[in-house]
Amino acid sequence: MRGLKAVWRGAVALLAGLVLAVPAVAQQVGYVLGPDDTISVAVYGQTDAGVQTRIKPDGTIVMPLIGSVQASGQTVITLADLVKKKLVSGGYFKDPIVNVEVGAYVSKTVNVAGKVGNPGLYPLDRNYRVLELLLKAGWVKDQGANFVYLRRADGKETRLETEALVRGALDKDPYLQPGDTLYVPDAETFYVYGQINKPGALPILPGMTVRQALALAGGVTATGNDKKIGLYRVGSKEKDEIELDALVQKNDILVIKERLF
């Protein structure tokens, strides 16, 4: 089990490296500017013609020479082209080189909360799928569940399995939208006590069987009997014995009984 977990973590680390390696320029392509974003507009060779400013609530910025410009709804490329056209049509320059860069992405963000490495607000500086943003946020902690809730701005909520995300199931790894929230809850747990080496509450891994649960709990003690395991399950009658290949469910209580000599 430890070997499989190591392979899993290695795959996640590799994917994280790929996401973090995306150049900053590539991340800005396609971002649609909005109110409260901070941008810099530079006209090469003409320092007095540029500006560093925040986009106003009405979506405009004020530029030297040409005045008010509608920035909201533009990308950095289309805004640079718009500013250039206004400078040319106003007779200020013949063929200016205009560059626009985003200083702070504010208008379009996603909330990442719960059991992740670095919870917080993340800008949608390009199109992100759920997996990509979880990796940027430091991935799921050991105490986190093996699923994540995606809550849209309209209140609609979807549960996504992290295993499906990592396996590349694109139909189960949607693109994020402004105002979305990703929430990773605490891992679902089971409880084990009695003749077991590490009693207590433990996380349920995907597809975990009773046999695997016992291994995670350090195995049965020398006086324990893995053929005599009691099961207490919410909504069901107590079972004196349970098969080792049975699946563990949330809040199950496993009781390892003593061996009779």
Image (spheres, helix red, strand yellow):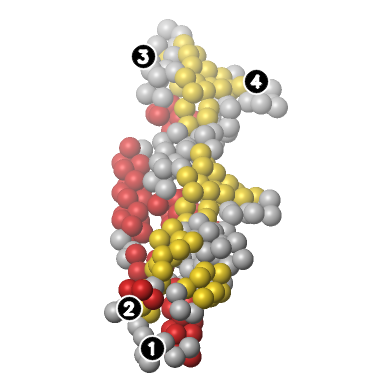
Task: Please say if the residues under marks 1 and 4 sit with CB atoms less than 8 Å apart.
Answer: no
Identity of the amino acid at label 1? Answer: Phe
Say which label, 3 or 4, has the lower sequence index: 3
Q: Residue at x 54, y 74 (%)?
A: 68
Q: Nearer the viewer, residue 176 or 27?
A: 27
Q: Residue furthest top?
A: 261
Quadrant of image for the C terminus: top left
Residue mark closest to the camera, 3 vs 1 = 1
Task: Please say if the residues under marks 2 and 4 sit with CB atoms less than 8 Å apart.
Answer: no
Residue with the mark numbered 3: 222
Answer above or below: position of 202 versus 195.
below
Say which label, 2 or 3, has the lower sequence index: 2
Residue mark closest to the camera, 2 vs 4 = 2
Task: Please say if the residues under marks 1 and 2 sit with CB atoms less than 8 Å apart.
Answer: yes
Q: Position of residue 120 (x, y in %)?
A: 47, 45
Identity of the amino acid at label 4? Answer: Glu
Residue with the mark numbered 1: 93
Q: Nearer the viewer, residue 9 or 198?
A: 9
Q: Residue at x 57, y 59 (%)?
A: 178
Alpha carbon distance from label 1 to label 2: 10 Å
Q: Which mark is residue 238?
A: 4
